[in-house]
Image (cartoon, rainbow, N blue to C red):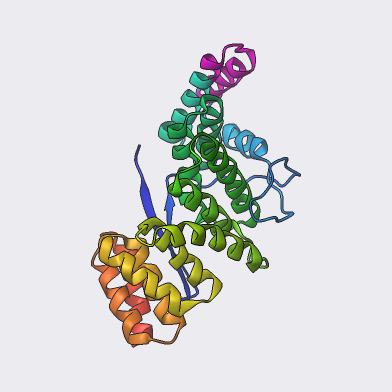
Amino acid sequence: MKKQQIIVISGGIILLLGIYFFGQTVPSKKPAAATPAAGTSQSFDIQLAIQGATAKLPEHQQTYVSGLTQSVVRGDVKEQQIKAFRQLAAFWSDSARAFLPFAYYTAEAAKLENSEKSLTFAAQLLLDNLRGIEQPEVKSWLAGQSKELFEKAIVLNPNSDSLKVGLGSTFIFGAPADNPQAVMQGIQQVLEVSRRDSTNVYAQKMLGIGGILSGQYDKAVERLEKVAKSEPEDLEVMLMLAEGYERSGQKAKAIEWYEHAAEHISNPALKAELTKRIQQLK
């Protein structure tokens, strides 16, 4: 599967690494059944999103999608439904390049298969892409779906710290701007893992990013500095360190990490954005 990493730079302050696989499909709004991870009342209807994306396809592709969708409804054998969901996911991934339908069908296939591997893959896929989403209703839906998938995986492997960190992260990244309590709820869940195992790099990274988002900059950069030593090629950590230092007023350290991150970026447009930010700080 091809992946494209896009850095979202907003207002010279918010700089996060969002991992997008495809262009977003922004749907009409309608009450949805999914329960958001962060407790927000905003809604999103994935079926309307899929319908809108399908309407933009060439006729022969619409026919193909319609046939697979109907086969899911008709299929009375779970394996047939899983196969159809995976075919739909592959289509939206490789042919249509639309992330939200791809995410939905990947998640539905994982729920039916109900294996730790498939549930974890789908949950992490949604969580990773959640970080770069700006629309609150879409972010809420992705967070809710990711949360559900992590919870199902934890039922199968209740001792997995990685799954627990992932679950807590759905709150950290899925919380709306006006609900900092949800961020703290996620941080507390990840802290439970960190207290048992202070060497868990994934937990330290999520706590560090969560600290940046919640304004606890000193502790956040301390955690992220440790993560950077263990994972020196992690671009997201570099960028979050730069942002943390910038927000705490330590311009020299912020510049250092922005420059370090720029060395790991090949995209000229993204490198130019970082260079511009560095010049603004000098």
The quarter in which the N terminus is drawn is: top left
Residue 62 belongs to the span the image colors magenta: yes
Note whether residue 97 is visible. Answer: no
Q: Position of residue 230 (x, y in %)?
A: 27, 62
Q: Position of residue 21 (x, y in %)?
A: 42, 45
Q: Position of residue 38 (x, y in %)?
A: 65, 56
The residue at the point 53 percent across, 76 percent down is 215
The quarter in which the C terminus is drawn is: bottom left
Front-lying residue, 147 or 265? 147
The residue at the point 64 percent across, 45 percent down is 27
Front-lying residue, 231 or 193? 193
The residue at the point 46 percent across, 39 percent down is 120
Farthest residue to the left: give it. Answer: 263
| Count of marks placed on residues | 0
Is 238 on the left-hand or right-hand side of 79?
Answer: left
Is 21 on the left-hand or right-hand side of 140?
Answer: left
Q: Position of residue 92 (x, y in %)?
A: 48, 33
> To which quarter of the image does residue 261 belong?
bottom left
Is 83 on the left-hand or right-hand side of 263?
Answer: right
Q: Where is 193 relative to 87, above or below?
A: below
Note whether residue 252 is visible. Answer: yes
Residue 10 belongs to the span the image colors magenta: no
Predominant SS of the magenta segment: helix
> To which quarter of the image does residue 173 belong?
bottom right
The residue at the point 48 percent across, 37 percent down is 157
Front-lying residue, 177 or 199? 199
Magenta range is 61-81
